[in-house]
Image (cartoon, rainbow, N blue to C red):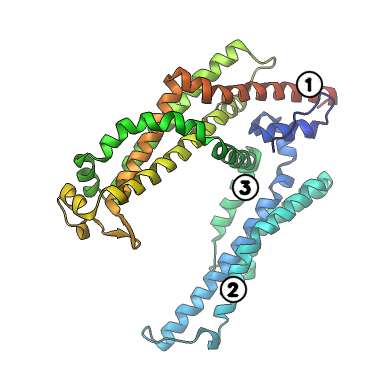
Amino acid sequence: MPTPDPTPASSLPAHEDHLRALGLPLMIAPSTRRRELLSRSAGVSAALAVAGTGLAAADRSNDYTTALLERVGPDSDPDLLAAPEPIVQLLLLAIALAAIAPLVGWLVSKTARRARPAIGSALGLVSLIALVVVPHVAFDPHDGPTHRTTLLAAAAVLVGTYTGLGSLVRWSARRVRRELTTMGPMVARVLPILMLAVLFLFFSVEIWQVMVELSWPRTFAVLGVVVALTVLLVGISTRDDILHELRDRGPEHPLRRGERVNLVMVPVVATLIQAALFATLVFFFFLTLGWIAVPDVTETRWTLRPLNDTGGLLFGLPVSVTLLRVSLMLAVFSALNLAAAAASDAAHKARFVRPMLDEVVRGLAAREAYLRARRRGGR
C-alpha cells in the first residue's frame, strides 16, 4: 500500500518517510542521515551478528567432523550423534541462528527507531560492535568470518545505511510486486511483436550450434555484455528524459549531485525491473517451447553432436543444457529489445515510461515540501 503524501503541516519525519517510500533516500539532508546512522543501522548489524555467529558454529561443526573422519578413516561411516564432539548440536545451532537472524534484526530495528535518539544510537553502536566481535568471541577466531570480513561488513552496513540502500531495496521489492500485477498489458503489447523476430532465431540451426560450443564462463560473458548494453541504454534514455523534465519543471532549490543520481536511479531501476520480469517470462516460454517442439533427435541434428556430448539433461529434467543456454540468450535479447522500445517507441513510452517520469515529478514535489518543512523547523 503506497504511503500517503504528507500534508504541509506534517512532521519532518513524515516527509522523510515519504521520500524513502518513493525510493529517494538521498533527498534527505546529509546531516539527518548522519544523525540517524547508528539507529537506522542497528537492525542490519544485529541480524548480521547473529548470522555470523551461526556461520562460526557451522564452521566449528565442520572442523569437528573433519577431525572425526581423520581418526576413524575416510571410508568409515561414523555415528555423529555418538561422537564426543557436539557436531550435530553445533549444526542445529547454526541452522537456528540463521533462521532467527532476520527476526532479531527486525525487532532490534523497530526498538531502535521507536526509542529516544540517544537510546537508538546506543543500540546501533552495540549492534555494530556485536557484528565485529561476537562471532570471534563465541568460538575460536579461526571459526566463521575473519576479523577483516566482519570489519568490512560493519563498514558496508554504515555506508549502505547512509546512502539509503535499505530504503531502495524496500522500494524495489514493492516495485516488483507492483510490476507483477501490471505485467499483462505490457506482455500483450510487446510479446507478440517480439515473437515474430525471436521465434525465427529460436528455430535457427546456427544459434544452437553456437550455444552448444560455448562453455559456461563464455555463456555468462556473452549474457553479461547484453545485460550491460541494456543497462546502458536504459540509463542514457532515462537520463535524457529526466533532464527534459527538469528543464520544463525545474525545482525551486538546485539538486545536489547525490540527489540527481537518486532521481535518475528510480526510473532506471523500475525499467530494469520491468525488463527482468519480461526476460524471465520469455525464458520460461522458450524453455517450455523447446521441450515441446525440439525433441532430442532434432537437437542432435542441429548441434551435430550427440545429446550426451552437449551436457545432457539438466538435473534430471527433460531440458538439455543447450536449450537452457539458447533460452537464456533469447531472454536477455528480449530484455534489450524491450529497453530499446522504451527509448524509441512513442506509444510504449507514453504507456509505460510516462508514469515513471510522473513519479519523478512527484518526487521533486515531495522534496520541495520536505525542504519547506525543514525551514519551518529551523533545521
Residue drawn at (64%, 68%) of the image: 137
Which one is in front, 122 or 148? 122
Disc 2 residue type (three-letter): Leu
Q: Position of residue 362 (x, y in %)?
A: 66, 23
Q: Are marks 1 and 3 in contact (CB under 8 Å)?
A: no
Q: Which residue is mark 3?
A: 157
* Residue 10 visible: yes
Q: Which residue is mark 2?
A: 92
Disc 1 residue type (three-letter): Arg
Disc 3 residue type (three-letter): Val
Q: Position of residue 336 (x, y in %)?
A: 39, 32
Task: Describe residue 44's horizontal placement relative to residue 321 as left or right.
Answer: right
Residue drawn at (43%, 20%) of the image: 345
Q: Earlier in the sequence, mark 1 or mark 2?
A: 2
Task: Describe residue 299's horizontal placement relative to residue 171 as left or right.
Answer: left
Q: What number is the disc on residue 372?
A: 1
Circle 1 Cα neighbour tier, 10 Å, few/some/many (<14 / 14–19 / ≥20): some
Circle 3 Cα neighbour tier, 10 Å, few/some/many (<14 / 14–19 / ≥20): many
Q: What number is the disc on residue 131?
A: none
Residue depth check, mark 1 versus mark 3: number of the one nearer the observer: 1
Q: CA distance from mark 1 to mark 2?
A: 54 Å
Residue depth check, mark 2 versus mark 3: number of the one nearer the observer: 2
* Residue 228 visible: no
Which one is in front, 295 or 48? 295
Which one is in front, 162 or 170? 170
